Amino acid sequence: MSSLRSTSPKFLNLPEDAWRSIAVHLATSDILSFLSVHRNIKQHLSNSASFWGQLLARDRDEEYESNNNSTKSERSCCEDARNEFMMQAYKQALPVVKWIPLNIQNTLFASAREGHLSCVLDGPENSKTLVITGGFTDDDGVTVIGIKSGEQTWGWTRLTPIVRSSLVYGASLTALPHVDSGSKNVTIAKAVRFGGFEGGGYSNETDAVWLLTIRDEDHEDGSFSQTASWEKVETSGASPRARAYHSATLIHGRYLLIIGGMTWRGSTIEEAILDTQTWAWIDITLACSGEPSGRHGHSVVWDKSRGRLVMFGGGSGTDLLTSGVDNNEVWELKMNRIEIPSFGGTGSKMWRWSKLYEDTISDEHEDDSDDSDDSDAEVEENNEMEDTNDRTYNNTANNLSPAESLCLGRCHNGMKIAPDTVLLMFGGGRPNTNGVLGYNLRTNAFIRPLVRGPMPMSRFTGIALFLDTEGYVFIHGGYNGEESATIQDMHLLDLGPLLNRNFNSLPVDTNRRSNRVVTDEEAESGGRMSGYNDERSVIPMDRFLMHMLSQQYRGLDDTEGL
């Protein structure tokens, strides 16, 4: 390491390893300030790809794998790693998001639909495939969007499955870990489908399990082929209750946890676990005292670092439009340091429910639950908790306004975008919203990002796919209650607009007009929307400071500093 000036403060004479040790224990905004203190610190740390990789590994749930290849220069690798860290920081803090409308006119993309299925399949060398299929439609095709590392354009196509499945809506489609095909020219990716309604009018729910396989092959003559195929899985063990509009969360890359859902009789909270390696349903025992009421259209994320699952909102009823009520509750299911619940184990071996956020939007919950095995005591306890509603809406971190609460309403989109951050958007049965909300898993508090760009149409029961490396959320379809119609449009939500990126991987609709935003009064009354503000005019101070620190860092060159 080059010697530092003798006139520098003593801490500037510390070895590079000491600076690195200090930096990796700082919060993101403090790291940017630390690097801006002096040109020597910036020169030694900011220009080190391994330093940024170390920070990325610190801030991820999973092991960090660099996107860089051996053909890139050290400077280029460092720039990529630094940009990836900044993207991770913005996903974690969620200060600002921006809508990007896409132009799908004159294409054969997936038709307008609701209740459809989607997932992101990981491939080799950081490639991925977005899958869209099913829903309330007679189209059983599989639309795929391919994203390959190093290629700017996202290619898409529509596949007709070699082996077809039954048509369902309100089912779940969950990506399974990447499969090694044994050939460098063949890529195989799989996803598991569970449940859904097979009949119109929210009827004929199923407990069937299907496996979707997407096979890509590069042929010796330079051509490329891609196929889709369904396979019905014969499971063992006692099958759970058939349902739709449930949640499905993959744990440890193996166990598919099913929670809640809708049946023709009402909503359930029943939990079930499917071992995707043996295809056996596991007989689980949970601590059910004070468990959530029956619900559908909720979302669940795995908070790995805290050993729990967190469930957001949902609704009750036997359909999506005419029965039941929404809620904005937040629950946690503590895993008690055990991978899966035991077979009829003792209390110490059980997972346990507890409520983190009380429902503040429902004056009265309809008892339409399909959990026929609930005891009277449990029902009474649930009713008591549901009646303790806080009717004060002051937009603090722990109080949601009626309009914000719609982001937790039935059939919203919820996903974990960083180890401590959940993104919640759209949702609500009457009315729907186009709102965006965040949740901090570390503090159990809500986040309100500044929203830019032309607002999409309000909706629920659409799809939202999180693209981790790219820092976008892909949106398609859904149902708008005001227009009483399904939606065909596509949008991207940019999670890092402060990076000033220019998206051109798919055609962008530069003429799209902004849609209206639901108000608190309309959310409470379920009335039609009126009035619109394109962007919020006040930026909270913490977001402003983070933006300024980012600008300060980008503007600091090697000749500046103390």
Image (cartoon, rainbow, N blue to C red):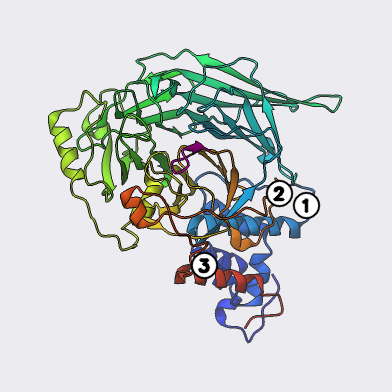
The spot of residue 508 in percent (x, y) is: 68, 50
The spot of residue 169 in percent (x, y) is: 47, 26
Task: Identify the residue under disc 2.
Answer: 68
Q: CA distance from mark 3 to mark 2?
A: 25 Å
Q: Quadrant of the N terminus?
A: bottom right
Decide: is 70 above or below 118.
below
The answer to the question of whether label 1 and label 2 lie on touching residues, with beta carbons closer than 8 A, is yes
The kind of secondary structure element at disc 2 is loop
**As drawn, is 436 to the left or to the right of 321?**
right
Would residue 336 be counted in the magenta stretch? no
Sort mark 1 into few (<14), some (14-19) or many (20+) by Cα contacts within 10 Å.
Answer: few
The kind of secondary structure element at disc 3 is helix
Amino acid type, residue under disc 1 in the picture: Lys
Amino acid type, residue under disc 2 in the picture: Asn
The kind of secondary structure element at disc 1 is loop
Amino acid type, residue under disc 3 in the picture: Ser
Which residues are the magenta region? Answer: 480-486
Which residue is at a point 61% across and 14% down the rendered structure image?
163
Q: What number is the disc on residue 29?
A: 3
